[in-house]
Amino acid sequence: MYAETLLSNNENMINDGTIIWTKNQTNGKGQYNRQWISTSGLNLTFSIITFPNSLLATQMFYLNIVVSMGVVALIQNYYDDVFIKWPNDIYCKHNLQLKKISGLLIKNGIVQQYIKSSIMGIGCNVNETEFSKNLENAISLKKITNIHFQLSELFLKMIDHINYYYIKLYNNKYDELMTQYCSMLFGWEKPMKILVNGKIEIGKIINIAQNGKLQIQINQQTSWYEHGQIQILL
């Protein structure tokens, strides 16, 4: 990732909020080193470098909250049925099917108990209309709205939305952010399918910790789970 190299070599010269935007991403990464495929000039692929020095490492999930809500808020300007799939994806419901429109990857540098730096990577399908067979669950803004978007204009709007929530984080509006996040979260307090220990269960999310762990109720029993221990099924 170019942002990582830039940060490691020039940390003292990079301003908080530096954005690296490319219209031709050739080595995009998602969770578990999955590849993020994007046709040149059709989508939004960028990273934001921040230095949230007062944010504790145990609060790192708030960065995920800020970015994911910013992306959802942008999409809601054009399409209503959009939600966050914990922990890193944005989905839309289109023609009775759930389709992925955006993904996030956040990497934090931690010193002692604080987050020294964060690289918040965002990929959003905008004008893409053809997806490979390996991406059958993918969709774009153009596919769901029949609008061809100007990337530069959409990019600035997305930054504004992310910045709106980042300022709330800067001002320690933790409870407000968490409440808003839960309202956008797929499965919040509603029965859904969850893969736990290789078995599909019906459960619902009833709480979320500031480190991103979910408290899920299954068969009247509640347990906390972190990313990797469970899979939310759509």
Image: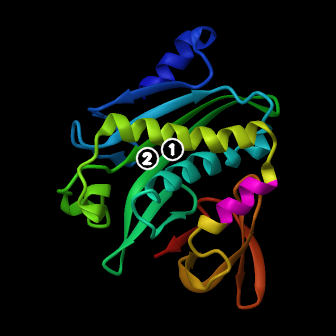
Q: Secondary structure at mark 2?
A: loop
Which of the pair 118/129 is nearer the observer? 129
Whether residue 156 is in magenta: the answer is no
- Secondary-structure class at tag 1: strand
**Left or right: 202, with 92 as reference point:** right
Depth order, front residue of 151/27 = 151
Query: What amino acid is at disc 2?
Result: Gly
Q: Is residue 121 visible?
A: no
Disc 2: which residue: 30
Q: Residue at x 57, y 42 (%)?
A: 162
**What number is the disc on residue 158?**
none
What residue lies at 49% left-to-right and 26% top-to-bottom? 19
Q: Residue at x 69, y 56 (%)?
A: 212
Residue 105 marker: 1
The quadrant the N terminus occupies is top left
Please indicate, yes or no, whether residue 45 appears anywhere in the rendered image.
yes
- Residue beneath the point at 26% across and 32% down: 24
- What color scheme is it? rainbow
Q: Please name the amino acid that badge 1 sits on.
A: Leu
Q: CA distance from mark 2 to mark 1?
A: 6 Å
